[in-house]
């Protein structure tokens, strides 16, 4: 079974239609920062897509997600674990 981080990576690649394998997304890269700062350059619409994908996958409302929870794949995984999502 995939880890929470692997699932988040997969959702980001699918929802953003990125032309890279999910495992190439760094866990600590800032999702919304510019590439020049090591970020992935996602935008506010991307955050809605990611939250929607995670909500569908884990059957959670995710209506209390704040910007700090969306900083990196790792912070998203921590948020999901805090809300009871188990690995796999």
Image (cartoon, rainbow, N blue to C red):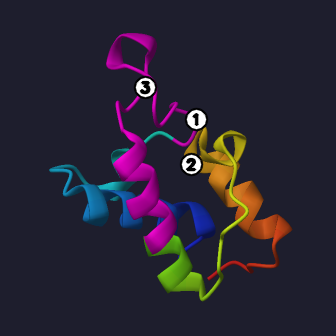
- Residue at position x 34%, y 19% from top? 35
**Mark 3 or mark 2, which is nearer the start of the sequence?**
3
The local secondary structure at tag 1 comes to loop
Is 20 one of the magenta-colored residues? no
Give residue 16's quadrant in the image.
bottom left
**Mark 1 and mark 2 in contact (Cβ < 8 Å)?**
yes
Q: Nearer the viewer, residue 45 or 78?
A: 45
Judging by the rendered image, the residue that carries numbered circle 1 is 28
Q: In the image, which residues are magenta?
A: 27-52
Which residue lies at the image location 52% right of the left edge and 72% below the top edge?
54
Cα distance between the residues tagged 2 and 3: 12 Å
The Cα atoms of the two marked residues, 2 and 1, are separated by 6 Å
Q: Which mark is residue 8?
A: none
Crowd class of label 2 (few under 14; some 14 to 19; many from 20; radius 10 Å): many
Q: Is residue 17 above or below residue 4?
A: above
Is 68 positioned to the left or the right of 28 in the image?
Answer: right
Residue 11 as seen in the image, left or right of residue 69: left
On screen, residue 29 versus residue 83, left or right, reads: left
Give the x, y percent position of residue 44.
41, 44
Image quarter of the C terminus: bottom right
Q: Position of residue 70 (x, y in %)?
A: 60, 46
Instruction: Bin the neighbour count of mark 3 within 10 Å (Cα to Cα): few under 14, some 14-19, many 20 and up.
Output: some
Disc 3 to disc 1, C-alpha distance: 9 Å
Could you say which is closer to the camera, residue 49 or residue 21?
49
Q: Residue at x 35, y 45 (%)?
A: 24
Considering the numbered disc 3 on the image, is that residue within a helix, a strand or a loop? loop
Q: Which residue is mark 2?
A: 73
Q: Return the residue found at the far bottom.
A: 59
């Amino acid at each position: 079974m995939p880890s929470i981080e692997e699932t988040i990576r997969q959702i980001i690649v699918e929802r953003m239609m990125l032309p890279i394998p999910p495992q190439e997304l760094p866990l600590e890269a800032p999702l919304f920062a510019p590439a020049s700062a090591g970020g992935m350059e996602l935008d506010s619409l991307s955050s809605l897509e990611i939250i929607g994908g995670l909500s569908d996958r884990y059957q959670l409302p995710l209506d209390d997600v704040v910007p700090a929870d969306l900083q990196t794949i790792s912070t998203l995984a921590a948020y999901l674990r805090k809300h009871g999502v188990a690995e796999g």
